[in-house]
Amino acid sequence: MKKTKFAYEYEINASKKMLYPYFTTASGLAQWFADDVNLDEDNIFNFIWEGEDHKAKMVSHRTNSFAKFIFLDSDKLEGEDPDWVEFKIDLNEMTQTTFIKVQEYNDFDDKEEQAEVWEGLLHTLKETVGG
């Protein structure tokens, strides 16, 4: 199945420093991104959605700026076009407005439904941080 890269941007009233742990820690991600998130001794994140495990590795991050996760699929060898998600926290210097930019690469082909999912997730995050 062909994979597609999706990109979304959301304004949020919170600082980069406040938001960063919500994108990089199991406890932060569990508050808005998945039903539950665990981190094992090998630093592999286990995202749990509707009772199903989805393991991912944080492959890059920069403090108070971004985090990228690659999902580990047991059917694929490492490096074989994996699904991934990246969260960037940007600040517009002129307006002092904070934006969350989400990029996602997967084989989900309904862009409208995917946008609705992210709208819901970011709404939950905004309620959680008060932004």
Image (cartoon, rainbow, N blue to C red):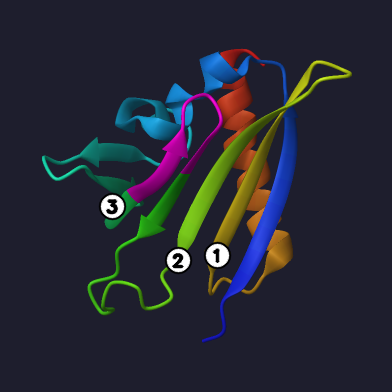
Specify whether 86 is left or right of 42.
Answer: right
Q: Kindly identify which residue carries mark 1.
A: 105
Q: Is residue 107 above or below residue 65?
A: below
Tags 1 and 2 touching, CB below 8 Å:
yes
Q: Secondary structure at mark 1?
A: strand
What percent of the width, then of the height, locates residue 83? 45, 66
Give me the C-alpha separation between circle 3 and circle 2.
20 Å
Looking at marks 3 and 2 on the same chain, the residue that comes earlier in the sequence is marked by 3
Q: Nearer the viewer, residue 101 or 113?
A: 101
Residue 83, label in figure: 2
Give me the C-alpha separation between circle 3 and circle 1.
22 Å
Name the amino acid type tagged 2: Asp
Q: Residues within 10 Å of mark 3 (few under 14, many from 20)?
A: few
Magenta stretch prevailing secondary structure = strand
Q: Is residue 91 above or below residue 69?
A: above
Q: Residue at x 62, y 72 (%)?
A: 4
Read off the magenta span. 58-67
Q: Nearer the viewer, residue 34 or 99?
A: 99
Give me the C-alpha separation between circle 1 and circle 2.
5 Å
Name the amino acid type tagged 1: Tyr
Depth-wise, is mark 3 or mark 2 nearer the camera? 2
Specify whether 35 is left or right of 13.
Answer: left
Looking at marks 1 and 2 on the same chain, the residue that comes earlier in the sequence is marked by 2
Q: Residue at x 35, y 52 (%)?
A: 50
Q: Kindly identify which residue carries mark 3.
A: 51
What percent of the width, then of the height, locates residue 128? 54, 19
